[in-house]
Amino acid sequence: MGRNENGTARAALIAALNLADASPSERFDRIVRIAREVFGVPLAYVNLLDDELLHTLTPNVPDELVSGPVGWSFCQLTVRHPGPTVIPDTTADPRTADLPGVTHRGVRFYAGVPLILTGGDVVGTLCLMDTRPRDFSAPDEAALIDFGRWAERALAGALDHDRLLDVVAALTPPPLEVAGYRIGAIAVPYGDVSGDLHDWWSDGEHLTVTLADVMGKEQPAALLAAGVRAALRQHQGRGPAAAVNTAEPALTEDLGRAGAFATLFHARVALDTGLVESIDAGHGLVVHLGADGAHRMLRSHGLPLGLHHGTDPRTAGSIVLAPGDALIVASDGALDLGNGTVDTLADLARTFGRTRDLDAFFETVRLRSAERAEDDVTVIVLARERQAPDGRNQRTSSRTADAEGTSAAGV
């Protein structure tokens, strides 16, 4: 069993896989479905075993228990050996004759192989069961090993995916307190991970805000979005035009190789004056909401990243964010929250304008996304505080924070 003799390392890996309590998955169901057909057995399972419990990822019948004590299982024997464990007649083997599977379920045959991840960590088993004794030949054992390797690759993919979720979560900007301003965002992925990127940072004099929307969904788009973030972060001390013009050649090459493009809104706010300089690369989903409730769309006049192959550098536009004003920036998935047109952004602006409360607004976006969205939805709000007659800022919301919604939070 290598490093897993005390079960501790195995338990940690199973926790990282995040599969023990998950719903049945076709990638594992397909493996056991074909195994049942190939070997002619009624039961086949992909199981995970920690030091106390066995968790099956592939229940064979409705309402079948999906976890139970390891000590009651046949698979406790399998994880102790590197090769197949075959028991032709469970009633004739003292190791298994008294197990509940034999005495209560009538299992008379068992064959299993351990599932080993890279590094030699045993995390589970792939096993076959029958209600009658049977022989199991050397070719049968070889075929069972092949099915085990298939299940191992599926498990390794789950672990890689889980690590990707950790990376994506690490790229989410932390809540940011900036005197005189409130900034927050909600990101609701359509799948497990999003192709939208939002980011912000401040040097005390300026606040930089980014929203990018990479064509596509899930892992490929999320990886490309992480690349956009990294490229812009390398130039975070520069204005929007200088940062984008410097980073764009390499981004265009990366996006082109992937056959993708990304829309981008990248802005820098002078905190003392509220002057907002921005580059809009094919995004065009930005609303300037005035203190009086009036709003106007900020139009895009440039192509997305990956499609701008001209030699002309991008030039920044500018507006002033006066006290009481706000910018609302959304990805195109937010259009699903309304009628699918830019009128949806006007509706979002009116919704925020009614209360100027970040938490209430983001909860509305989250609920609408759960009901209607068919794409990743990200919305950023940057609001400049009103000023009281004595010159102090008046806050209109209880908190300044990132209201990030992730697949792990179930939104």
Image (tube, rainbow, N blue to C red):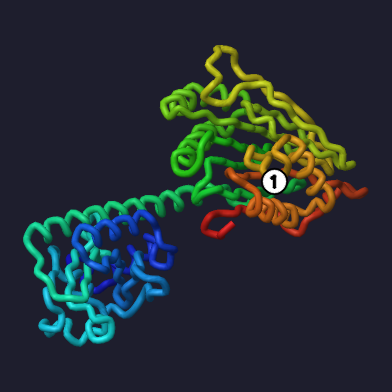
* Residue 328 falls left or right of residue 389: left
* Residue 77 falls left or right of residue 231: left
Q: Residue furthest top?
A: 311
* Residue 165 falls left or right of residue 235: left
**Which image quarter: residue 1?**
bottom left
**Which image quarter: residue 326?**
top right
Q: How many neighbours does mark 1 have within 10 angstroms: few (below 14), some (14-19), or many (20 or more)? A: many
Q: Quadrant of the C terminus?
A: bottom right
Q: Residue furthest right?
A: 389
352 or 113: nearer the viewer: 113
Which element type, helix, strand or loop, lies under badge 1? helix
Look at mark 1 in the image and give the residue it sits on.
337
Q: Residue at x 59, y 13 (%)?
A: 312
Tell me the amino acid under the disc marked 1: Leu
Please tell me whether residue 343 is drawn above or below residue 356 in the rendered image: above
Q: Position of residue 101 (x, y in %)?
A: 25, 81
